[in-house]
Image (tube, helix red, strand yellow):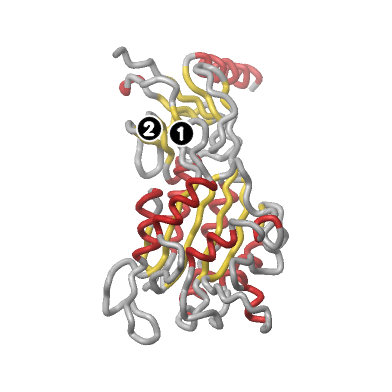
Amino acid sequence: MKLYFVFNIILIMLLTACGDSAKFGIAQRADVFGQQIEYNDKVDILWVIDNSDSMADHQANISNQISSTMDALYATKLDFHMSVVTTDMRSSLSYPDYLKADGRLIGDVKVLKNSTPNIEQEFADMIRAGTNGSTVERGLDAIYRALSEPRLSNENAGFLREDALLAIIVVSDEDDSSAQSSSDMIDFLNTLKPEFSYGNQAWVMNFIGVTELSSTCTTLNQYSSPGLEYMSLVDYSGGKSSTICTADLRDALFNVRERIVQILTEFRLKKQPDLETLTVYVNGSILVNDSNNGWTYNAENNSIVFHGDGVPAADAVIVIDYKPKIL
C-alpha cells in the first residue's frame, strides 16, 4: 500500500511538470505554463421568477424538481450564492405582497449558500413566489434594479461578488415588458461583470419559458408570448433556453446547470496543443475525450471543457498533459 501511494504521488508530480495543472473554476490566480494554477470556484446565481397569475403550476413544477440542481452544485463543491427576485416592479410598500417587488431579493434568507441550513426547502419556497405580482412582467428591470445601487448595498447586500461568475436564470411564460431593452442589459452586464483577466466570460443568461410561438404553450388567457428579449441575452451570452410548457422540467434544469458548470470548468491552455498528445487526468486517472461524460477541446478558446459525469469536483487535481503544436 505504501509503495502504491508513493508511485501515484510520483506520477502526479511528473504529469504536472509537463503540462498544465489546475483546480477548476473561473477566477485565475496565476497563469504559468507547466506549474500549478490555482482557481476559485465561485458562482452567483440570480433566479428571476415571474409571479403573475398564470405561473402557479410552473413555479410548483420547478420547486418540486429542483433537488437535482442542488445535488449538482454540492457534487461539484462550488462556492455558490443563490437568490431570487420577481418580475413585479411595483414599488409601493403599502401591501405585504409588494414587499417582494422592485428588485428586492425575496425569502427569509436572502442569499443561500453552501452552508445555509435546510437549503433545499428554503430555495423551494423562494421559487414558489406566488401569483399576486403585476401582469406586466419586467424581468430585465428587476435584474437591473437588483444589481444596482441602492439595492446592491442595502436590501440585496451580500449576493454579488466581484470574482464570481454571475448566472441569471429567468423563469416566465411571457416576454419582457421592461424599460430596459436587451441591448441595454447587455451593456449593463458587460460593465458590471467584464471578462475575467484570462478572457473567460463573467456572466451568462438562461431562460425557462415560451421559446416559440405556439398554440400549446400559452398563458391563462391562451396568449402565446415567446420570451424574445430574454432569449436575445441568452444567445449573446451563450446560455440555454428551454421550454416551460412541460410538466417535467428536469431537462430544462439540467441544461441550465450543465451550461453553468461548463463555464466554470473551462480551462484555457497556455499554448496551442498538438491534439494527438492531449491527455487529461483527474486525481491521477485518465479522463476520456467525450462530449457527454468527459472532456472536449474548444479550439476557439484554446481550452478544455468538461461535461456530464466527467466534471471534476472543485478540489480535484486536474492535469492536462500535451505537447505544444509547432506552428
Q: Nearer the viewer, residue 165 or 141?
A: 141
Secondary element under disc 2, as helix, strand or loop, is: loop
- For the N terminus, the quadrant is top right
Secondary element under disc 1, as helix, strand or loop, is: loop
Question: Marks 2 and 1, Cα distance to the nearest angstrom?
Answer: 9 Å
Q: Up-down: is 139 above or below 323?
A: below
Residue most extreme to the bottom: 221
Q: Is residue 41 left or right of residue 108?
A: left
- Foreground tag (2 vs 1): 1
Q: Nearer the viewer, residue 251 or 81?
A: 81
- For the C terminus, the quadrant is top left
Badge 2 vs badge 1, beta-carbon distance below 8 Å = yes
State the image coordinates of residue 317 (x, y, percent, origin top left): 56, 29
Q: Residue at x 49, y 67 (%)?
A: 139
Q: Quadrant of residue 313?
A: top right
The residue tagged 2 is 301
Q: Is residue 14 left or right of residue 221?
A: right
Q: Residue at x 56, y 35 (%)?
A: 27
Q: Up-down: is 322 above or below 232?
A: above
Q: Residue at x 66, y 52 (%)?
A: 114
Which amino acid type is marked by label 2? Answer: Asn
> Which numbered disc covers residue 313?
none
The residue tagged 1 is 199
